[in-house]
């Protein structure tokens, strides 16, 4: 088995019943597994809501480590709509040439350093710094700010061996408190300052609302981007013919990004809370219990994707849900896609091949099911193109 392979632990349950029950901190979760059911449930925000107690829709639940609501992620329409309309233009900026011109040298520098070193531990010494420094462009903050963020590690709420790290959560909350107070006094052109001067539905944003948007920005695109970058490197190391294809057929890069996101599904699932007794896949879901929209399972549904357990870089029809679906689809998707487009283009231009020297898989335990989401560590040798 190739080291970049990510198996599908949901296949049997998806084919037999379309759902699976699991328990998460004494709060049961019904996992919705079929592509059509995941999309239908994600679209039905009236039945499956996000605006429950802060942290409850996340699996594993974060209710014990934070009280701040992530915005607009943990809001439902119509309240969600006003906040989404406010921040969406900011998160579409990666489509602009000026934005990409700032992002490209950051990514190129990380690749050049990896080539110069020869061998790199990709998770902590490549993907984490790249993600953090790229985030300064999204937030429109000085690149030096990323040095602190790098020190937080690959997840702002979790540590290896500890799925919910309250100290980390407190550290992020303290940072947001500090930056909000600092930028109230000396506002700039960063996202903090923009939000502090903004209104939704005629009301000025509160400090907690500003911090809620920023908490989502720091948390939502961290481990997911890191996993995507790392898994992509591992896949290309295992499949040198793919490097050659992407180099010779750059028009396939955008399709390859969608396929890699589908196949690796960096976020396994996201919960919702049922507002009434309902039924999905002929399975009863009770009011005030959680339903998991299992993106990873939906992305391997053989009724939707031909040869779902293979990476087909130029897959033509690819309605994956790797960035979510419906009203709460990922705000950071444009930023993530832009990172990946620049990254893959530069990587295949500069390297001939890569070799995995050793690795330690990052395995999620889903109440008895195990799913590889990436790596805790992976050492890779970068061989420069002659």
Image (tube, rainbow, N blue to C red):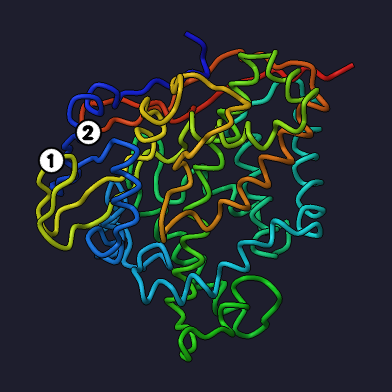
Residue toward you, 165 or 357: 357
Q: Which mark is residue 18?
A: 2
Residue at image x 49%, y 54%? Answer: 330
In the image, residue 268 sits, relative to residue 362, either above or below, namely below
* Count of labels in the image: 2
**Residue behind mark 1:** 282
Residue toward you, 142 or 231: 231
Residue 41 rendering spot, x and y as whole percentages: 28, 51
Query: Could you tell me which secondary element the residue under label 2 belongs to?
Result: loop
Residue 23 rendering spot, x and y as whole percentages: 16, 40
In the image, residue 103 sits, relative to residue 181, either above or below, namely above
Query: Could you tell me which secondary element the residue under label 1 belongs to?
Result: loop
Residue 133 rendering spot, x and y as whole percentages: 68, 50
Which residue appears farthest toward the top when viewing the image? 1
Residue 278 rendering spot, x and y as whole percentages: 13, 53
Q: Is residue 36 left or right of residue 239?
A: left
Labels 2 and 1 touching (C-beta < 8 A) = yes
Residue toward you, 81 or 264: 81
Residue at image x 28%, y 43%? Answer: 37
Q: Is residue 132 left or right of residue 39?
A: right
Q: Residues within 10 Å of mark 2 (few under 14, many from 20)?
A: many
């Amino acid at each position: 088995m190739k080291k970049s392979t990510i198996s599908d632990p949901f296949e049997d349950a998806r084919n037999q019943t379309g759902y699976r029950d699991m328990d998460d901190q004494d709060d049961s979760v019904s996992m919705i597994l079929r592509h059509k059911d995941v999309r239908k449930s994600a679209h039905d925000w009236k039945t499956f809501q996000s605006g429950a107690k802060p942290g409850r829709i996340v699996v594993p639940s974060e209710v014990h480590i934070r009280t701040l609501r992530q915005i607009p992620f943990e809001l439902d329409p119509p309240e969600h709509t006003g906040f989404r309309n406010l921040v969406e233009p900011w998160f579409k900026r990666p489509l602009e040439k000026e934005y990409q011109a700032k992002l490209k040298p950051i990514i190129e520098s990380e690749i050049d350093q990896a080539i110069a070193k020869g061998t790199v531990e990709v998770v902590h010494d490549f993907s984490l710094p790249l993600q953090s420094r790229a985030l300064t462009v999204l937030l429109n903050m000085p690149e030096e700010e990323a040095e602190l963020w790098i020190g937080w590690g690959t997840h702002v709420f979790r540590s290896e061996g500890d799925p919910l790290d309250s100290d980390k959560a407190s550290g992020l909350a303290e940072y947001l408190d500090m930056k909000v107070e600092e930028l109230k006094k000396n506002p700039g052109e960063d996202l903090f300052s923009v939000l502090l001067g903004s209104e939704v539905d005629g009301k000025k944003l509160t400090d907690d609302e500003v911090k809620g948007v920023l908490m989502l920005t720091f948390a939502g695109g961290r481990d997911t981007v890191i996993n995507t970058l790392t898994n992509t490197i591992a896949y290309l190391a295992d499949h040198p013919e793919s490097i050659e294809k992407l180099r010779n057929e750059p028009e396939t890069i955008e399709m390859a990004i969608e396929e890699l996101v589908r196949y690796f599904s960096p976020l396994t699932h996201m919960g919702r809370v049922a507002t009434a007794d309902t039924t999905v896949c002929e399975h009863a879901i009770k009011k005030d219990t959680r339903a998991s929209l299992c993106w990873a399972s939906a992305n391997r549904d053989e009724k939707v994707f031909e040869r779902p357990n293979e990476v087909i870089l130029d897959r033509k029809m690819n309605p994956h849900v790797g960035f979510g679906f419906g009203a709460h689809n990922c705000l950071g998707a444009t930023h993530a896609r832009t990172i990946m487009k620049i990254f893959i283009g530069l990587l295949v231009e500069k390297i001939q091949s890569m070799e995995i020297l050793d690795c330690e898989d990052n395995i999620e335990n889903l109440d008895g099911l195990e799913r590889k989401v990436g790596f805790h560590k992976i050492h890779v040798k970068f061989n420069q193109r002659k």
